[in-house]
Structure formats: structure tokens, C-alpha cells
Image: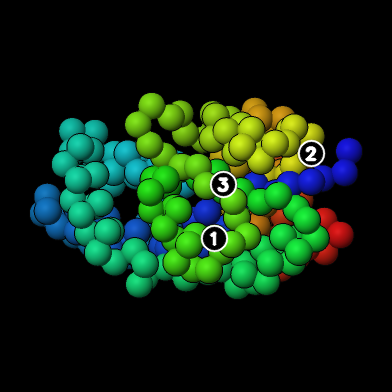
Amino acid sequence: MVKKGVIFDLDGTLVDSYEAIAASLNAARAHFGFEAQPVPEVRRHVGWGLEVLMERSLGAERVLEGVRVFRERYREIFIALTRLMPGARETVATLAGRGYRLGVATNKPEVFSRQLIDELGLGRFIAVVRGAKDGVRLKPEPDLVLAVLSELGLAPAEAVYVGDMGVDIATARAAGLDVLLVATGSQTAAELEAAGAPHVMLTLAELAAILA
């Protein structure tokens, strides 16, 4: 079946927000007296949701307070310290111009995700953004992707999911979508291939040609 839509992950796929995430995580670590972690180290743990990031960095008993401190700092800096991945704007604009219905399904909090999409100039192309909020199961569960599909009016076979991690493979398969991965996020191309990725792009700019 011809694809009619594309659903994107956010961090590591459409946007580079690792500096903002690392700064906010390190604010939480400092709150508990821990040393700061460098951005490359933080980057490898992004993508599973904020609570998982906090648990891995601070320990299970500090998650709630860590999340509070993280969000307080993140609200102050996330717009200024986040930028689009190379080729993201051009790729999204090209796909929208071809008539693809576009959405985002991410483990990032939905309120921050929507703001980033709008502030970075993608809001006029991407109609639906779904992310973490109370009562929603996160990836690798298929709920977020299925919610975006429903709002876009698409069947799973009519869309492709584009992400940057092995968890995105499991998510897409659980939702019944084909998946393409880009090696610009938390995992290298070799790691993505080892995780079973059917196709790995080195940059998002490749996507428009693949879907042509």
C-alpha cells in the first residue's frame, strides 16, 4: 500500500535537544550533590521517558524530586538550547508539499514537544503531536503512535514511523507500521543495525528520496 503519512520521533530524529536535557539533568544531579554528566553520556540514555532517565541517573528513590527539578530548569532553557537536526526542516516541508500527513509520537512530555515543534517552525507542517502525559503508556507500547494515526485518519499500513533508537523498532512493530531509523540520536548506525533496523539513514535528508 502506498504510504500516506509519516510519524516522527522527536529527540534525536527531528530535533537536537541533548544540551538542554543534559543541563536540566545536571541541575537535578547537583540538587542531590552528584557531579555533572557530559552531554555524550546523557545522550545515550535519552528516549525512554523522563522517569527512566531520572532513575538511571539518580536512583529510584530520587525520581519524583529529580523530575521536579529537571522540569523547573528545562522550562527555562529548552527553547534556547534546542535546534533542528540537519535537513529536518527541508525534509518535513518536502513531505508536506507532497501531501503526506505528518505527526510526532515521542516519549518527551507532550507540552514541551508541541512548543518545540511550533517554535522551531514545523507547526505548519506537523498537525498532530503526542507525547508523555498522565495516563499514557510510553514507547515501546504502541499507544502514542496509534493515537497519532487515529488523528491523522490513517491505517497502520498507510504510514511509516521514523526514529533513532532500537525502541522505535519495537514501537513501530507493535503498532503495525514500517520503520526507518536515522543514526543522529542516541544510538550509532552499527547499534541500530544490530538491533534489527530494516533500514538506517545517516541523515534525515535521505528520507524524502526513500519515500519518493
Between disc 3 and disc 2, the foreground one is 3
Residue 5 badge: none
Dot 1: element:
loop
Give coordinates of residue 19: x percent, y percent.
Answer: 37, 67
- Tell me which residue sits at (29%, 43%) in the image: 54
- Tell me which residue sits at (64%, 33%) in the image: 150
For the residues labelled 1 and 3, the Cα–Cα distance comes to 9 Å
Q: Which residue is mark 3?
A: 128
Q: Amino acid at mark 2?
A: Glu
Q: Which residue is mark 1?
A: 123
Q: Are marks 2 and 1 in contact (CB under 8 Å)?
A: no
For the residues labelled 2 and 1, the Cα–Cα distance comes to 22 Å
Between disc 2 and disc 1, the foreground one is 1
Q: Is residue 70 visible?
A: yes
Give coordinates of residue 11: x percent, y percent.
Answer: 49, 56
Q: Amino acid at mark 1?
A: Gly
State the quadrant of the N terminus. Answer: top right
Give coordinates of residue 169: x percent, y percent.
Answer: 65, 39
State the quadrant of the C terminus. Answer: bottom right
- Tell me which residue sits at (32%, 39%) in the image: 51
Earlier sequence position, callout 2 versus callout 1: 1
Q: Are marks 3 and 2 in contact (CB under 8 Å)?
A: no
Q: Residues within 10 Å of mark 2 (few under 14, many from 20)?
A: some
Earlier sequence position, callout 3 versus callout 2: 3
Query: Does residue 143 appear to the left or right of 56 in the view shown?
Result: right
Q: Which residue is mark 2?
A: 158
